[in-house]
């Protein structure tokens, strides 16, 4: 086995850790391994010389004083992340080191030298600086967004917070869990407790609460945090942010107030409309009905004794009274369709169309209309409303016909899956006067007429009523076609309704 001194010296010579030994008060270099010589950019000739005369860093730095202090006191010295200018290829290069000065004692305990070891940590220093810079930038960004940060040690319940956190939470004394909870509005404390209980399962703390300010006013904040677990999987820390949402909450409250006011106003308006519709149905229908009756009496009693001009006037009275009655009934239907809930039931569309064919038998015969109906599916809906929908669309097709050409109406259907809902698309196609594409949406507006009342009868409500019925059934309606080349109304309805009433 080699001599212990030689063995130790061999280790020091081959270790990659720069190591040197200084002796006497003049700090003579008595030993320096290759790693240290390389760091100093020196060769073995430096051994036996004073460090102050040989190495510039020791002349310009307090290192010599630190070594002498260790030599005199026997107290080791340690430096971390110390910047030193090292000469590399003739150029002073700043590097960072961790280094130690440890006293050496003889068998009598007398200090005879100092051993110097060091490790370059320049890259580690740069990484740390980047982390610090990133943390500072993140902190600035968070502060700029009006947020505050916090960290809770779940083992000790110690809390670290940013200054903005303290400002938002309205605290400036020692921060504890109890102190934070005491600042919460009493109605919101249970909300916080529940959020923390839930966080133990999902790992996320999230809640909104009111903070009681020093003047007893309240301010809304939003808390968001994430639980970090230790190596055993146990919750150890919560990192999070607090955001000021007071202005947002005030806006929501004001918006809610305005919506409630608008809703109340709309409800009043609807009630007034319903009341008006009831007045129309009772107070106006009666005099119109009497006008028709007494006009009929006159026509039956004296029409044969009146000149042709007077008979023409009586006919115009009858026609106007009939139109007024249609408008009143249409207005009543349009204004009351949303007021009553209708039960959803299974509707056999083929039977429904046959019933409408019977209702319109006279006009079909009079105009020589051809109604072609392919096999239609069964759907769920309010039977009375779907009946009204089909009736209006078929009657509409028979109304807007070309002169000297019998109306031809084809009703077909296709079952489709639309947005994951099984639906039926029903087409009502005619050979009438068509519709200009620029009016494709306008015709579903109440009281909107594309033709004068002298050309075609109607109250301008039929298609608007169709739109309402389709909307109540969660469907759509649209029209395509060209002027003088027929029109096609396409109605899409779900086969099944989600609710029992619509």
Image: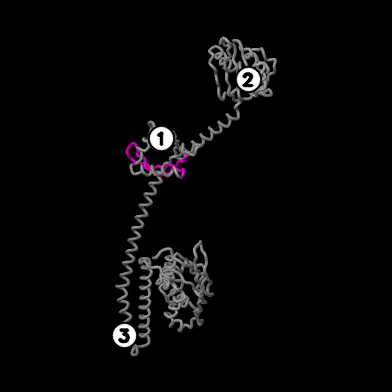
Q: Which of marks 3 and 1 is in front?
A: 1
Residue 42 part of the magenta segment:
no
Mark 3–mark 1 Cα distance, whole angstroms, equals 90 Å
In the picture, the disc for residue 233 is: none
Above/below status of 303 relative to 439: below
Labels 3 and 2: the sequence-earlier one: 2
Is 204 magenta? The answer is yes
Instruction: Say what secondary structure mark 2 lies in.
Output: strand
Residue 297: give its label. 3
Q: Can residue 135 be seen in this snapshot?
A: yes
From the image, state whether disc 3 or disc 2 is nearer to you: 2
Kindly state the secondary structure of the residue where label 3 is placed: helix
Chain-order first, disc 3 or disc 1? 1
Q: Which residue is drawn at 52% across and 74% down?
A: 486
Q: Quadrant of the C terminus?
A: bottom left
Side (left or right) of 53 relative to 415: right
| Segment tinted magenta in the rendering | 202-227
Residue labelled with disc 2: 19
**Distance from the alpha carbon under mark 2 to that under mark 1:** 49 Å
Q: Along the line of sight, which residue is nearer the eye, 337 or 501?
A: 501
Q: Which residue is drawn at 46% across and 84% down?
A: 365
Evaluate if marks 3 and 1 touch, with contact meaning CB atoms under 8 Å apart: no
Q: Earlier in the sequence, mark 2 or mark 1?
A: 2
Q: Which residue lies under the disc numbered 1? A: 166
């Amino acid at each position: 086995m080699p001599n212990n001194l030689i063995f130790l010296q061999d280790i020091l010579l081959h270790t990659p850790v720069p190591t040197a030994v200084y002796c006497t008060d003049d700090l003579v270099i008595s030993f320096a391994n290759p790693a240290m010589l390389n760091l100093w950019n020196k060769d073995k000739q430096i051994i036996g010389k004073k460090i102050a005369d040989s190495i510039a860093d020791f002349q310009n730095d307090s290192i010599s004083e630190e070594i002498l202090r260790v030599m005199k006191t026997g107290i080791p010295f340690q430096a971390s992340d110390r910047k030193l200018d090292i000469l590399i290829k003739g150029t002073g290069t700043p590097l960072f080191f961790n280094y130690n000065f440890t006293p050496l004692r003889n068998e009598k305990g007398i200090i005879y030298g100092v051993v110097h070891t060091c490790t370059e940590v320049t890259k580690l220093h740069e990484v740390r600086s980047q982390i610090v810079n990133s943390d500072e930038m993140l902190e600035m960004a968070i502060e700029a967004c009006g947020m505050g940060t916090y960290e809770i040690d779940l083992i000790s319940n110690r809390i670290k917070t940013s200054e903005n956190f303290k400002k938002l939470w309205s605290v400036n004394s020692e921060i504890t869990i109890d102190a934070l909870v005491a600042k919460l509005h009493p109605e919101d404390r249970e909300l916080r407790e529940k959020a923390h209980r839930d966080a133990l399962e999902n790992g996320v703390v999230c809640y909104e609460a009111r903070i009681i300010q020093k003047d007893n006013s309240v301010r809304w904040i939003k808390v968001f945090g994430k639980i970090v677990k230790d190596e055993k999987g146990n919750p150890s820390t919560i990192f999070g942010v607090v955001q000021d949402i007071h202005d947002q909450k005030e806006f929501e409250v004001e918006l809610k107030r305005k919506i409630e006011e608008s809703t109340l106003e709309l409800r009043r308006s609807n009630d007034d409309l319903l009341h008006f519709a009831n007045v129309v149905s009772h107070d106006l229908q009666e005099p119109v009905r009497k006008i028709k009756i007494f006009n009929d009496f006159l026509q039956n009693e004296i029409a044969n004794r009146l000149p042709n001009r007077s008979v023409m006037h009586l006919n115009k009275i009858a026609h106007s009274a009939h139109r007024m009655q249609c408008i009143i009934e249409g207005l009543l239907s349009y204004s009351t369709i949303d007021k009553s809930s209708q039960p959803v039931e299974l509707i056999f569309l083929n039977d429904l169309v046959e019933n409408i064919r019977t209702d319109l038998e006279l006009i079909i015969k009079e105009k020589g209309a051809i109604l072609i109906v392919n096999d239609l599916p069964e759907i769920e809906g309010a039977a009375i409303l779907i009946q009204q929908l089909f009736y209006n669309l078929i009657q509409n097709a028979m109304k807007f016909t070309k002169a000297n050409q019998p109306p031809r109406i084809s009703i077909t259907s296709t079952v489709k899956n639309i947005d994951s809902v099984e639906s039926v698309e029903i087409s009502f196609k005619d050979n009438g006067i068509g519709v200009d594409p620029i009016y494709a949406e306008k015709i579903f507006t109440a009281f909107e007429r594309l033709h004068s009342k002298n050309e075609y009868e109607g109250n301008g409500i039929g298609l608007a009523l169709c739109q309402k019925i389709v909307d109540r059934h969660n469907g759509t309606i649209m029209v395509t076609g060209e002027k003088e080349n027929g029109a096609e109304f396409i109605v899409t309805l779900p086969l099944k309704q989600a609710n029992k009433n619509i």
